[in-house]
Image: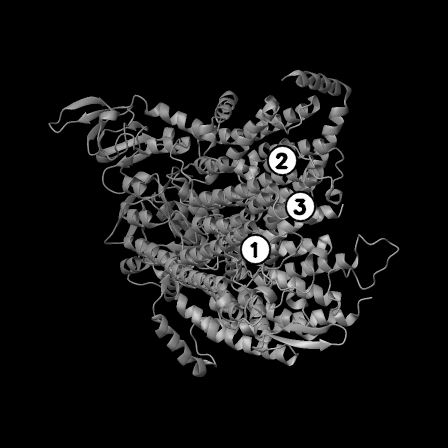
């Protein structure tokens, strides 16, 4: 029997997130509207120094193209710098464990993976990454990528508020995101992990002696602060290879649940921030409710089929549920909550072996990555949700007999075109590489292509295109093909939707507002919320049901 | 009793606009649309077209496709796919062809009018020569005489004409057009009944009103409207995405080596999932929208204007003619103190007996209805004192010497020297409520006051309420003073009113509303309405108006009934709703199709077979057939538009989601099951079974 306390844990954790999200959302809106915050006294000079360093004028407003160009430039510089760092790390300091230089393809994959907020790890951290690379390379990208995501969100949102064609100043948004949002939250998160006993040190290993095993070298590092930004930034790449199944990184149920809170916090605060930014706080609810409804549905499916496992012969009763792939230290509901939170927030951190889960649990996780928006990663997840909303509003708006409009802005050809591009990129980026891998027989031994292998390949590219980063194993993916194809999928899967979001924001910003009347489709209503949820499920289902049937679902029959 | 000059919407005679279509022609043009050059403009159907050709190749050239099974029974199945895909395309063509034929029928009768039109041109030296209409230019003058057909649109320069415009407008009542004033424009193609006049041509050949009408209803000028374009992008995206989904699926299936799925079945899956219902009917919906406007006897100059009508936020309505009947009518008799009510009514009746204005007639009508009877008098012995602007009253001197006056209260008081205080008070109260008091005197004594009232058109209150429910704000524009305007506004339920409006007020109003970012429509007929008509998002010009007004508006109402603006709004909304509803239907019925097709294709997922379809290939054919059938079944809906009742948006959304979303889902499940059972039974029917066996044997022998 699952102890009732485990379910209580789940409920309490989610309540904490839901209580904190509106508060953080309100604060984020303050940050992005340049209103005073508590930290100004302390961080104002830091901001000013950074602006002077970058040569940025705070007053300068950018159109979407300029905003996008600067965003891409900054990301490109970060990508190239980290790539160079990774291929030369052997000769750089802080490499006590002797990590060799990465190969060009592995370095491409790794740098792309971290700059796109994917954090898919084809490398083994303990063996292939120096502390220097971790601290100054990958950890930098773990701040750059979620901050970029939030900038995209805020520029997109401004489109609804403005009518002069501008979407904000990228550098101002970027710096304020780092200093006002990530800095304080990461400090709090790090303190939480430290209190629970997670190590934070520059020592790279400790040697332990045990009577049975003799001397053991145990890798160490600045794990607590790494964990904090890995989860808050919906990054998901672990300091250790075993990610958060490693007891040093995730020693207790308290750190597990803290992790859930950190992962969901910013993605769920974003809709509230959106509501405040556009000065219609009520508009946050249909978005939050839709995201949570689908999240809970997935959690329910995950748990139900793990507890009622169809594979177990009736003679075996497993009262604790289907524990294959689960961390023995945590209960199934807690682990499931962590796993679903991680995949649905596109973090990709893991405490379970996804390849060993039931097909339904795998299906529910894949579905979250197909959707990318319930609630999705920092900034971009909400941007994806808005794109779905725009398409839903377009069809729904026609049904009430008006040219569709959302939040007082007309939804026309431009918006539909870009939304369609963002929506379309996902199946392209998943299905075509999977087809290539399957047809060319890459990553698996000849003749071993079965539904499980197919699921592995599907999961790999889905995770990369969604910028999720969780892995399932089961295929040999550290080859040139998987590194290069993966890097491309991650980059296009990240920046094409970002361009679409900025373009929509820019095109909306050029439009004058439409006054609201009884003839306008009300998006605050329950009707619209239900419609949106069904729309999300049906559209994602329409595009991806066939591959689910070929993959996890065919393991059921 | 003559009717007030208002044409009730039901009473128009539109002989030439009734859609009649010839079956043969529709059939021919639906087959002509199989031309790939035409097909390529409809992205969704073009993909179906390509894959139809592909299945034809699978059927006829099996040697080219070594993986494809090609036994006799396989080829019978492929034949089935080819036939159903053909039907899918053809059904979609039929919808478009019917809609086009409706438009063409309208155009043909118009073209007959145009061919061979001639005009008697007045040359600068004064000579008159007969020239064909095609050589006439803008600015030329022609002379028109009774019995002649007007060659091109123009303005009457001098003289007056009685014109039969029924060929153009379907209105059988003749109209008068004369130089000066607001009623100068004549339409090319209409016939002069009486009068001689010179007309200055205002349109170039090929650009007259007639030509524009022909082009529009024929669909030559049809360009995709903004919403249609956006929807096409969305549908194309879905199609491309599904194309990728199914193409990659083909590779997966090949590689996993199951050999379970053949390419024909994958084509069926693709076509079923693609939004063929909406994609196939999209052209028909657009054409039908313009046709429906035409059937309402309105000429829209572009499809864009029809679509914009659905989006309107504000309607600017003229008071006179739109909200009120147009004339003030007697509504009450107030006798002076000490005067018998009946006596007063008799005097009033007498006073108005020779007054032929609508006001006068209405006094006679009301008095008679209330039991007053006119005295028998010899009309020849009565002296009539006509109304004059100075006196502001009219009067009669009866044979017995009595002098009766009727007129403005002050004017009559000036004639009699005095007026009872109570009456003056009643008159003032009445003006405050928007009524016009007329005093009646008999021999220097005011005997009472008749109250005239602006009469709100019957039914206008309900229509304004409907508009409010749709979220459309109505503004009444009138030259009346605030009191009168306010009273009418209250009575009719209009949202806002502008009193003491001058000609330029409308333009300022249109500009103000547009600045607020709202879409505005107005009606107008005068030349000074033209700038406002041009700026309004929807400018509905009255056919009776000047050519300047008609040129400026983007729609012309041939019945000259301004109330029809409201009808136009409904048609525009219907157009959009029809598109949205069919898109939703297309998407939700896909869910049912997945549950029918995926278990038929993949044996590994029997738990998805909710419908219990046992024979996979029959399930595929049944689903594909359902997909094809939805198109002709929905053609009437596409042409007619979904039923639109004015409601709030949220209610409309819920209703249409339930009807077309949920309804589409349930219908698809039920219909696929029924078609499956029918097809299964049909195949087992001995005759059909034998036929199929013969076919199978035949196809097995074909290379």
Nearer to us in this view, B238 or B24: B238
The answer for how far apart the CA atoms under marks 1 and 3 are is 22 Å
For the point 59% across and 22% down, the residue is: B61
For the point 22% across and 25% down, the residue is: B135
- Label 2: few (<14), some (14–19) or many (≥20) C-alpha neighbours in 10 Å: some
**Which tag, 1 or 3, sits closer to the chain's start?**
3
Mark nearest the camera among 3 and 2 is 3
Q: Position of residue B464 (x, y in %)?
A: 48, 52
Q: Secondary structure at mark 1?
A: helix
User: Which residue is label 1 attached to?
Assistant: A464
* In the displayed structure image, the side of residue B36 where residue B596 appears, left or right: right
User: Which residue is label 3 attached to?
Assistant: A445
Q: Position of residue A279 (x, y in %)?
A: 47, 68
- Residue B375: image quadrant is top left
Which of the chains bears the disc numbered 1?
A
Which of the chains bears the disc numbered 2?
B
- Label 3: few (<14), some (14–19) or many (≥20) C-alpha neighbours in 10 Å: few
Nearer to us in this view, B382 or B472: B472
Q: Position of residue A388 (x, y in %)?
A: 54, 54
User: Which residue is label 2 attached to?
Assistant: B266
| Labels 1 and 3 in the same subunit | yes
Q: Secondary structure at mark 3?
A: loop
């Amino acid at each position: 029997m699952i102890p009732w306390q485990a379910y209580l844990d789940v409920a309490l954790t989610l309540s904490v997130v839901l209580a904190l999200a509106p508060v953080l959302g309100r604060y984020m809106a303050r940050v992005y509207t340049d209103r005073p915050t508590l930290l100004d006294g302390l961080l104002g000079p830091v901001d000013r120094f950074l602006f002077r360093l970058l040569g940025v004028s705070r007053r300068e407003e950018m159109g979407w193209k300029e905003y996008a160009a600067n965003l891409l430039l900054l990301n490109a510089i970060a990508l190239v710098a980290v790539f160079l760092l990774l291929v030369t790390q052997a000769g750089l300091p802080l490499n006590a464990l002797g990590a060799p230089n990465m190969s060009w393809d592995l370095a491409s994959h790794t740098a792309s993976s971290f700059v796109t907020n994917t954090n898919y790890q084809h490398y083994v951290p303990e063996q292939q990454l120096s502390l220097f690379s971790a601290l100054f390379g990958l950890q930098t990208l773990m701040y750059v990528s979620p901050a970029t995501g939030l900038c995209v969100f805020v520029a997109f949102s401004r489109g609804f508020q403005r009518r002069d064609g501008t979407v904000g100043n990228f550098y101002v948004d970027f710096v304020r995101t780092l200093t006002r949002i990530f800095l304080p939250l990461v400090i709090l998160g790090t303190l939480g992990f430290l209190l629970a006993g997670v190590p934070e040190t520059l020592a790279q290993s400790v040697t332990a002696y045990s009577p049975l095993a003799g001397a053991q070298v145990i890798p160490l590092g600045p794990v607590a602060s790494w964990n904090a930004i890995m989860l808050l930034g919906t990054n998901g790449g672990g300091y250790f290879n075993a990610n958060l199944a490693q007891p040093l990184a995730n020693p207790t149920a308290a750190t597990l649940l803290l992790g859930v809170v950190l992962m969901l916090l910013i993605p769920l605060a974003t809709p509230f921030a959106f509501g405040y930014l556009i000065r219609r706080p009520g508009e946050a609810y249909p978005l939050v409710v839709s995201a949570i409804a689908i999240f809970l549905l997935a959690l329910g499916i995950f748990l139900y089929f793990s507890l009622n496992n169809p594979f177990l012969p009736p003679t075996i009763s497993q009262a604790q549920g289907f524990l294959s792939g689960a961390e023995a230290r945590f209960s199934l509901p807690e682990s499931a909550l962590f796993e679903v939170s991680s995949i649905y927030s596109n973090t990709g951190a893991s405490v379970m072996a996804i390849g060993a889960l039931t097909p339904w649990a795998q299906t529910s996780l894949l579905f979250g990555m197909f959707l990318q928006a319930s609630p999705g990663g920092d900034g971009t997840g909400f941007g994806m949700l808005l794109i779905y909303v725009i398409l839903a509003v377009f069809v729904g708006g026609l049904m009430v007999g008006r040219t569709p409009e959302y939040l007082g802005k007309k939804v026309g050809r431009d918006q539909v075109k870009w939304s369609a591009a963002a929506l379309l990129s996902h199946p392209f980026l998943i299905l075509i590489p999977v087809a290539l891998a399957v047809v060319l027989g890459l990553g698996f031994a000849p003749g071993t292509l079965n539904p499980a292998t197919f699921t592995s390949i599907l999961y790999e590219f889905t995770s990369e295109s969604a910028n999720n980063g969780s892995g399932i194993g089961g295929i040999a993916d550290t080859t040139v093909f998987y590194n290069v194809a993966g890097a491309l999928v991650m980059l296009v899967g990240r920046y094409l939707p970002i361009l679409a979001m900025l373009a929509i924001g820019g095109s909306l910003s050029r439009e004058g507002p439409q006054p609201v009347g009884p003839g306008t489709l009300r998006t605050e209503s329950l009707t619209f919320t239900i419609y949106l949820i069904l729309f999300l499920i049906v559209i994602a289902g329409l595009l991806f049901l066939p591959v689910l049937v070929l993959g996890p679902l065919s393991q059921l029959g | 009793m003559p009717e007030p000059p208002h044409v009730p919407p039901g009473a128009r005679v539109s002989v030439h606009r009734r859609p009649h279509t010839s079956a043969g022609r529709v059939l021919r043009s639906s087959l002509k649309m199989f031309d790939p050059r035409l097909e390529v403009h409809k992205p969704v159907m073009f993909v179906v077209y390509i894959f139809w050709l592909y299945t034809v190749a699978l059927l006829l050239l099996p040697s080219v496709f070594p993986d494809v099974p090609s036994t006799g029974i396989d080829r019978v199945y492929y034949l089935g796919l080819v036939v159903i895909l053909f039907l899918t395309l053809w059904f979609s063509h039929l919808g478009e062809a019917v809609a086009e034929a409706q438009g063409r029928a309208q155009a043909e009768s118009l073209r007959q009018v145009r061919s061979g039109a001639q005009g008697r041109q007045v040359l600068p030296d004064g000579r008159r020569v007969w020239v064909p209409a095609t050589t006439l230019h803008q600015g030329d003058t022609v002379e028109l005489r009774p019995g002649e057909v007007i060659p091109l649109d123009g303005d009457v320069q001098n003289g007056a004409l009685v014109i039969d415009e029924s060929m153009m407008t379907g209105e059988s009542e003749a109209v008068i057009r004369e130089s000066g004033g607001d009623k100068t424009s004549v339409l090319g193609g209409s016939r002069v009944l009486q009068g001689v006049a010179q007309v200055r041509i205002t349109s170039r050949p090929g650009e007259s009103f007639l030509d524009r009408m022909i082009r529009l209803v024929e669909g030559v000028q049809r360009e995709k409207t903004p919403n249609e374009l956006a929807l096409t992008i969305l549908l194309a995206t879905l199609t491309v995405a599904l194309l990728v989904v199914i193409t990659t699926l083909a590779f997966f299936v090949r590689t996993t080596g199951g050999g379970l799925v053949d390419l024909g079945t994958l084509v069926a899956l693709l076509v079923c999932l693609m939004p063929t219902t909406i994609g196939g009917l999209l052209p028909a919906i657009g054409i039908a929208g313009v046709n429906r406007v035409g059937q309402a006897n309105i000429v829209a100059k572009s499809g864009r204007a029809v679509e914009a009508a659905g989006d309107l936020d504000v309607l600017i309505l003229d008071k006179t003619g739109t909200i009120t009947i147009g004339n003030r009518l007697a509504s009450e008799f107030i006798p002076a103190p000490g005067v018998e009510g009946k006596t007063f009514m008799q005097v009033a009746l007498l006073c108005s007996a020779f007054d032929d204005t609508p006001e006068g007639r209405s006094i006679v009508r009301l008095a008679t209805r209330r039991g007053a009877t006119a005295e028998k008098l010899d009309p020849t012995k009565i002296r009539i004192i006509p109304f004059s602007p100075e006196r502001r009253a009219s009067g009669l001197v009866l044979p017995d010497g009595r002098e009766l006056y009727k007129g403005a209260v002050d004017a009559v008081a000036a004639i009699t020297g005095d007026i009872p205080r109570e009456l003056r008070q009643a008159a003032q109260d009445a003006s405050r409520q928007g009524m016009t008091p007329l005093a009646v005197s008999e021999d220097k004594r005011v005997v009472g006051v008749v109250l005239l009232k602006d009469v709100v058109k019957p039914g206008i209150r309900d229509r304004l309420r409907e508009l409010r429910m749709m979220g459309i704000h109505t503004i009444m524009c009138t030259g009346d003073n605030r009191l009168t305007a306010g009273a009418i506004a209250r009575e009719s339920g209009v949202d806002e009113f502008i009193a003491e409006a001058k000609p330029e007020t409308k333009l300022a109003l249109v500009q103000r509303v547009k600045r607020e970012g709202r879409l505005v429509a107005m009606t107008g007929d005068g030349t000074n309405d033209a700038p406002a008509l041009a700026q309004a998002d929807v400018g509905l010009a009255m056919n009776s108006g000047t050519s300047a007004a008609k040129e400026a508006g983007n729609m012309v109402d041939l019945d000259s009934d301004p109330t029809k603006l409201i009808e136009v709004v409904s048609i525009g909304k219907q157009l959009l709703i029809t598109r949205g509803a069919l898109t939703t239907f297309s998407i939700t019925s896909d869910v049912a199709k997945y549950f029918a097709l995926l278990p038929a294709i993949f044996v590994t997922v029997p738990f998805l077979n909710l419908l219990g379809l046992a024979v996979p290939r029959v399930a595929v054919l049944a689903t594909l057939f359902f997909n094809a059938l939805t198109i002709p079944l929905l053609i009437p809906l596409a042409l007619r538009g979904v039923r639109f009742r004015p409601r709030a948006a949220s209610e409309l959304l819920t209703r249409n989601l339930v009807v077309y979303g949920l309804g589409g889902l349930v219908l698809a499940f039920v219909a696929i099951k029924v078609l499956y059972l029918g097809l299964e039974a049909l195949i087992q029917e001995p005759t059909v079974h034998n036929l199929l066996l013969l076919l199978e044997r035949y196809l097995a022998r074909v290379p």
